[in-house]
Image (spheres, rainbow, N blue to C red):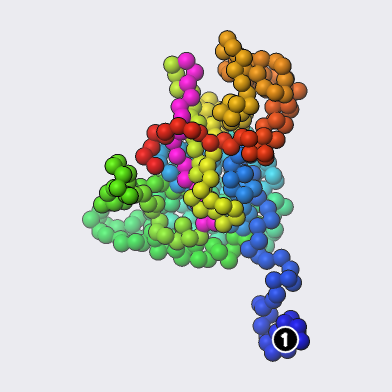
């Protein structure tokens, strides 16, 4: 007798039991929301995995919020809707519009406390389940470290202690999240701050090394299929003026492909996260774009030479030049000739 017939005969009321071969499992990842950077998509296993959660953490000024903004833009480009829970009260509408985000398709909430944030999230998920979205949706919690609980909001003085109250709140929400996020075709991003452990001291005997942790307890770490550490990188200069950063991303945990991979991306102070500048520096660091003398560069897709400061204008004015650059970049990235890593000592102590 087959296993399937045996189940039907001996356990007729066990409707939740099935064979893996019977159909697609709820936990299977079949869709991704692009990050906007092909090199990041590669080390994430395809982008932000739909039906799963991500914790993105790091020190200050490492591009955490900028990457979430880019995720919102890519979600909208695919036809989805984003929910942005702003606990830091740092939402900048002008910057969002500048990046090309449609403000009419971005749902914004500023919860007073963490429990209210979860309530908003569950209501949004109920709506998604009743009216299935045409494309994967995105939920951003910015940030766990800035979240305050209801008990802390109602305290009479600052001396009152609330031990692990935020951790318990996040743990309860995460346990419910496991069963809900895949059903509604959404991806959840928590941003978080890296904080030094009190009394952590040196680690591994290396002078100056410290131990880092993230607020909100351990459940956020366990609930995340992808844990992304954002780190400092290289300052980019326009003359004597700092014009942006070449920042790093490291996958500390990934349930889809092998973790502990890293790559860089460019945050330009003028335009925000820049796909075009990221492409240029990746090809430059991998010697796909080479110096031609006199401050000029040349790529293998065209004989036209260009100055580094004219890269963006050349891409905008010459469609053939852009198409060739993008084709070569994607080919070299797929073959592994372009890795997107930065080979230098970073500014932080990690």
Q: Nearer the viewer, residue 179 or 275?
A: 275
- What is the x, y in percent for residue 128? 65, 58
Q: Residue under circle 1?
A: 6
Spot occupied by residue 263 in the image (x, y as percentages of width and height) = 54, 39
Image quadrant holding the C terminus, namely top left
Chain part drawn in magenta: 224-239
Compared to residue 184, the image places residue 261 above or below, namely above
Crowdedness of circle 1 by 10 Å Cα count: few (<14), some, many (20+)?
Answer: few
Residue 313: name its quadrant.
Answer: top right
Residue at 52% x, 56% y is: 224
Asked if 110 appears above or below 220 in the picture, the reply is above
**Lateral position of residue 348 relative to residue 269, left or right:** left
Q: Is residue 101 visible?
A: no
Q: What is the magenta segment's predominant secondary structure?
A: strand
The residue sitting at 74% across, 27% down in the picture is 323
> Could you say where residue 150 lies in the image, as x and y percent from the top left?
38, 59
Give the quarter of the image for residue 156: bottom left
228 in the magenta segment? yes
Disc 1, SS: helix
Which residue appears at 35% of the width and 55% of the height? 153
Q: Residue furthest bottom?
A: 10
User: Looking at the rendering, in which quadrant would you find the N terminus?
Assistant: bottom right
Residue 70 in the magenta stretch? The answer is: no
Query: Please, is residue 122 above or below residue 96 in the view?
Result: below
Residue positioned 76% across, 23% down in the render: 320
Q: Position of residue 324 (x, y in %)?
A: 73, 26
Residue 192 seen in the current view: yes
């Amino acid at each position: 007798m087959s296993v399937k017939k045996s189940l039907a005969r001996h356990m007729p009321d066990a409707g939740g039991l099935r064979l893996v071969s019977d159909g697609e499992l709820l936990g299977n990842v079949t869709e991704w929301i692009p990050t906007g950077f092909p090199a990041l998509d590669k080390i994430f296993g395809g982008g932000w995995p739909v039906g799963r959660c991500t914790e993105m953490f790091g020190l200050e000024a490492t591009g955490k919020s900028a990457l979430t903004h880019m995720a919102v833009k890519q979600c909208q480009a695919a036809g989805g809707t984003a929910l942005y829970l702003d606990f830091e009260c740092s939402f900048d509408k002008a910057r969002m519009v500048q990046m090309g985000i449609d403000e009419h398709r971005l749902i914004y909430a500023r919860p007073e406390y963490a429990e209210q944030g979860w309530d908003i999230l569950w209501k949004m998920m109920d709506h998604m389940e009743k009216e299935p979205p045409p494309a994967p949706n995105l939920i951003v919690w910015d940030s766990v470290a800035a979240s305050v609980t209801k008990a802390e909001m109602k305290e009479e003085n600052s001396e009152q202690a609330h031990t692990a109250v935020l951790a318990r709140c996040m743990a309860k929400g995460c346990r419910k999240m496991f069963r809900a996020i895949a059903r509604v075709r959404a991806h959840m991003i928590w941003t978080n701050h890296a904080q030094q452990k009190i009394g952590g001291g040196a680690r591994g005997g290396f002078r100056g090394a410290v131990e880092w942790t993230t607020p909100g307890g351990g459940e956020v770490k366990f609930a995340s299929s992808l844990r992304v550490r954002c780190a400092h990188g290289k300052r980019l200069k326009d003359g004597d003026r700092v014009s942006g950063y070449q920042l790093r991303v490291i996958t500390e945990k990934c349930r889809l492909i092998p973790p502990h991979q890293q790559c860089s991306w460019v945050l330009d102070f003028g335009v925000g996260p820049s796909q075009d500048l990221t492409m240029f520096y990746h090809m430059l660091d991998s010697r796909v774009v080479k110096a031609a003398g006199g401050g000029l560069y040349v790529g293998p897709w065209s004989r036209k030479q260009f100055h580094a400061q004219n890269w963006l204008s050349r891409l905008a004015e010459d469609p053939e030049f852009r198409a060739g650059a993008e084709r070569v970049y994607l080919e070299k990235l797929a073959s592994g000739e372009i890795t997107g890593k930065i080979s230098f000592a970073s500014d932080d102590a990690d």
